[in-house]
Amino acid sequence: MTSDSKLDQLLNQLKNQKWHSPTILATKLNIPQPQLEQILKTLQTKNIIQTNPQTKWIKLNPQYANLLTEPEPTPNEEEATPHKPTLATIIIPPKQDITIQNLHLTNTTPQTLEIHIRTCQKQTQIAINKLD
């Protein structure tokens, strides 16, 4: 395990803004006590942590807490809003044609036709019925 990963583990323990015992942290994170003391000394010098002078316990300085929180995952557009299919019903009189956006429909029959269009994420469905 590298020193950086041990530092990351230590900061993850401290981000809850509570006081922590260095001895317990060393055991929990499997960091030798002298190495942890050196890391804590560096963090103290940089004013990243504070030490309780009576108990010698440590905690993260509040101004650094928001730097250690993980950002909220940004959902994909598909996950953000569920897909709602688009539905349309079109009635085309006999021997007539109609254009909707880039779709041109022609009824070449002598009957009136009812066309149901449903667009889904990956497929467009069309149903054609003869109106009586």
Image: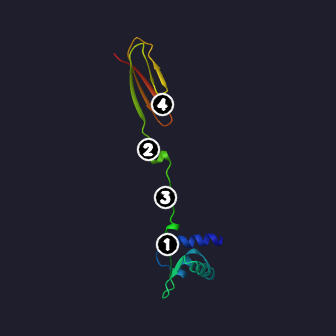
- Whole-percent x and y of residue 55? 49, 86
Residue 72 tag number: 3
The amino acid beneath tag 4 is Thr
Check the image and report above or below for 31 versus 74: below
- Whole-percent x and y of residue 4? 63, 70
Labels 4 & 1 near each other (Cβ < 8 A): no
Which residue extends farthest top?
110
Query: Which residue, given by chain and number where applicable, does mark 1 sit on?
Result: 63
- Whole-percent x and y of residue 86? 42, 34
Q: CA distance from mark 4 to mark 1?
A: 53 Å
Labels 4 & 3 near each other (Cβ < 8 A): no
Q: Return the disc, 4 or 1, that comes first in the chain's sequence.
A: 1
Q: Residue at x 49, y 46 (%)?
A: 77
Quarter assignment of residue 108: top left
Estimate how packed mark 1 is, as few (under 14), some (14 to 19) or many (20 or more) residues with alpha carbons within 10 Å.
Answer: few
Q: Return the disc, 4 or 2, that comes first in the chain's sequence.
A: 2
Q: Return the disc, 4 or 3, that comes first in the chain's sequence.
A: 3
Secondary structure under badge 3? loop
Q: Return the disc, 3 or 2, that comes first in the chain's sequence.
A: 3
Estimate how packed mark 3 is, as few (under 14), some (14 to 19) or many (20 or more) residues with alpha carbons within 10 Å.
Answer: few
